[in-house]
Image: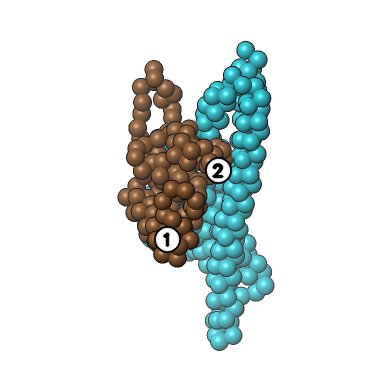
């Protein structure tokens, strides 16, 4: 009886210990490890001294593995972050080099800072979402959403989507992206919620030229055909992302830990 | 862990897990007991070492979850069973051949009798 209580106590302690694993590893193997630990303890339940030494040995073994998995996680994270910084650096080198040979490229310090912020922000977000789950459709949906957002902001800041960059109607695009970010936040990055958030964002994106048309009527230099074409393209990309997230829903919920 | 075609030696844990799975699907505890039995109690893995190795072996394509479900009345139906893949089998064979070559060399150099008694 005393042994049964000891087994129960050790199981509880082991459960706490398992919480120290990186979430991905714990979701994959936590239950199996807890079960195996329980089987081993039950095997020794008749011999209390044997049970104590076994539990201690297993906990030390697991603690060592926790440190290895944490180290691996940090190493992988560092690789991804280094890749994002390297790609950002390479992209920013293009205008820097072009400025030396052409007068048509004329970036200010502010332009470089804004571009670096955008590229790093979207790159690190994509990297985080990529590591979140091995699900291919979730990853593809995330990349499509993040880089569509980056494209919209980049084009909008550079030349403006509706008319030119000074047109106040272009501010609507930032509101649309805010809807997407807020939706992702409320969905806690889970695929079903992300699918809804991206669909809503797609609808909002498609509505931008219509709203701009009525609010800033008559729209000056709106370029109706180009604007509608561009918006349809972006809305389709967001709807595609929503579809990918919806496909990812068939994956076990455990594969998508909350943010 | 380098595993392709047995070009690099396997870690003891990986080798023993592959040996344990070579003759059938097993769950984590089953692998542990099989390894202990096959090594006559000399190799004892904890759940950390076992599942850490299992994770890396799945990622390397040496083993996979088998999808086997057992009768809930006989055992816990949530148990996950693992099985060896074709690549795992190939890697195990290559590793065992490497061991055989080493033993053959040792015998030729009269470092061991190659049979019972002293030596390996």
Display colour for chain A:
cyan
Q: Which residue is found at the position 39% from the left and 17% from the top?
A: B73
Dot 2, how many residues are within 10 Å of its Cα: few (below 14), some (14-19), or many (20+)? many
Dot 1, how many residues are within 10 Å of its Cα: few (below 14), some (14-19), or many (20+)? some
In the visual, does A109 lie left or right of A154? right
Letter of the chain that mark 2 sits on in the rendering: B
Residue B8 percent across, percent down from the top left = 45, 61
* Chain letter, colour brown in render: B
Q: Which residue is found at the position 65% from the left and 39% from the top?
A: A60
Residue A217 percent across, percent down from the top left = 49, 53
Q: What residue did someone put label 2 on?
A: B49
Q: Which residue is found at the position 56% from the left and 59% from the top?
A: A80
- Give the number of the disc on residue B26: none
How many dots with numbers? Answer: 2
The reply to whether callout 1 and callout 2 are in contact (CB within 8 Å) is no
Q: Which of marks 1 and 2 is nearer the N terminus?
A: 2
Q: Nearer the viewer, mark 1 or mark 2?
A: 1
Task: Give above or below for A106 relative to A135.
Answer: below
Q: What residue did someone put label 1 on?
A: B107
Give the distance between the C-alpha atoms of the residues marked 1 and 2, in whole angstroms. Answer: 33 Å
């Amino acid at each position: 009886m005393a042994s049964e209580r000891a087994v129960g106590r050790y199981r509880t302690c082991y459960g706490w210990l398992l919480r120290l694993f990186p979430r991905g590893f714990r979701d994959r193997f936590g239950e199996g490890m807890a079960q195996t630990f329980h089987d081993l303890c039950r095997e020794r339940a008749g011999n209390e001294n044997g049970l104590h030494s076994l539990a201690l040995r297993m906990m030390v073994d697991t603690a060592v593995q926790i440190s290895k998995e944490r180290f691996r996680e940090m190493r992988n994270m560092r690789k991804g972050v280094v890749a994002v910084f390297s790609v950002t650096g390479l992209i920013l080198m293009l205008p820097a080099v072009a400025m030396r040979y052409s007068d048509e490229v004329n970036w200010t310090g502010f332009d470089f800072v804004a571009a670096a912020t955008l590229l790093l922000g979207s790159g690190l977000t994509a990297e985080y979402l990529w590591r979140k789950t091995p699900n291919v459709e979730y990853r593809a949906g995330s990349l499509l959403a993040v880089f569509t957002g980056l494209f919209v902001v980049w084009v909008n800041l550079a030349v403006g989507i509706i008319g030119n960059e000074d047109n106040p109607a272009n501010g609507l695009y930032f509101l649309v992206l805010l809807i997407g970010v807020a939706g992702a936040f409320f969905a806690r990055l889970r695929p079903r919620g992300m699918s809804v958030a991206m669909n809503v964002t797609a609808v909002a994106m498609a509505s931008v030229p219509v709203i701009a048309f009525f609010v800033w009527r008559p729209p000056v230099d709106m370029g109706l055909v180009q604007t509608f074409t561009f918006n349809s393209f972006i809305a389709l990309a967001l709807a595609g992302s929503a579809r990918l997230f919806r496909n990812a829903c068939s994956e076990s919920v455990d594969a998508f830990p909350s943010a | 862990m380098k595993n392709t075609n047995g070009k690099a030696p396997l870690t003891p844990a990986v080798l023993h897990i592959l040996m344990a799975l070579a003759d059938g699907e097993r769950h984590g505890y089953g692998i542990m007991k099989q390894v202990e039995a096959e090594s006559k109690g000399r190799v004892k893995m904890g759940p950390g070492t076992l599942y850490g190795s299992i994770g890396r072996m799945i990622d390397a394509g040496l083993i996979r979850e088998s999808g086997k479900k057992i009768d809930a009345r006989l055992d816990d139906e949530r148990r996950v069973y693992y099985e060896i893949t074709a690549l795992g089998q190939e890697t195990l064979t290559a590793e065992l051949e490497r061991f055989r070559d080493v033993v053959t060399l040792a015998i030729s150099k009269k470092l061991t009798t190659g049979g019972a008694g002293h030596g390996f």
